[in-house]
Image: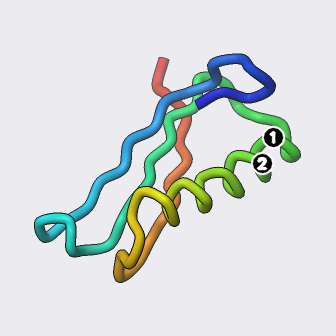
Amino acid sequence: MSVDGFLRGTWRLTRTNNNKGPAVLTIWQFHRPSPADRSAIEEEAARLLTFMAPGAPGAEIDIRELDR
């Protein structure tokens, strides 16, 4: 995941029930983003879920900070 061209975290998409269950996009951030950046991350995550898990019976975005 990048913000303004800088690497800010990583992400993983998981599905249950042989890819027929809900989709969860988990984002692990390296640093806490500003409110504006967090909003942009959430918007991009929603677009990514639409692309990566079309027709999923549910979708969730889970944003976390990496433990240090």
Of the numbered discs in the image, which one, if any, rests on residue 4?
none
Which residue in the structure is indicated by mark 2?
A: 40
Left or right position of 5 against 47: right
Q: How many marks?
A: 2
Label 2 residue SS: helix
Q: Residue at x 21, y 74 (%)?
A: 20
Q: Residue at x 69, y 46 (%)?
A: 41
Tag 2–tag 1 contact (CB < 8 Å): yes
Q: Residue at x 85, y 46 (%)?
A: 35
- Relative to residue 63, is residue 6 depicted above or below? above
Please identify the quarter of the rendering in which residue 12 is found. Answer: top left
Residue 49 horizontal/vertical position (percent): 49, 60
Residue 66 horizontal/vertical position (percent): 49, 28
Q: Residue at x 44, y 71 (%)?
A: 59
Residue count near mark 2 (Cα–Cα under 10 Å), binned few <14, some 14–19, many ≥20: some
Residue 60 horizontal/vertical position (percent): 47, 66
> Closest to the observer: 53 or 9?
53
Quarter the N terminus occupies: top right
The residue type indicated by label 2 comes to Ala
Of the numbered discs in the image, which one, if any, rests on residue 37?
1
The residue type indicated by label 1 comes to Asp
Query: Residue farthest to the right?
Result: 36
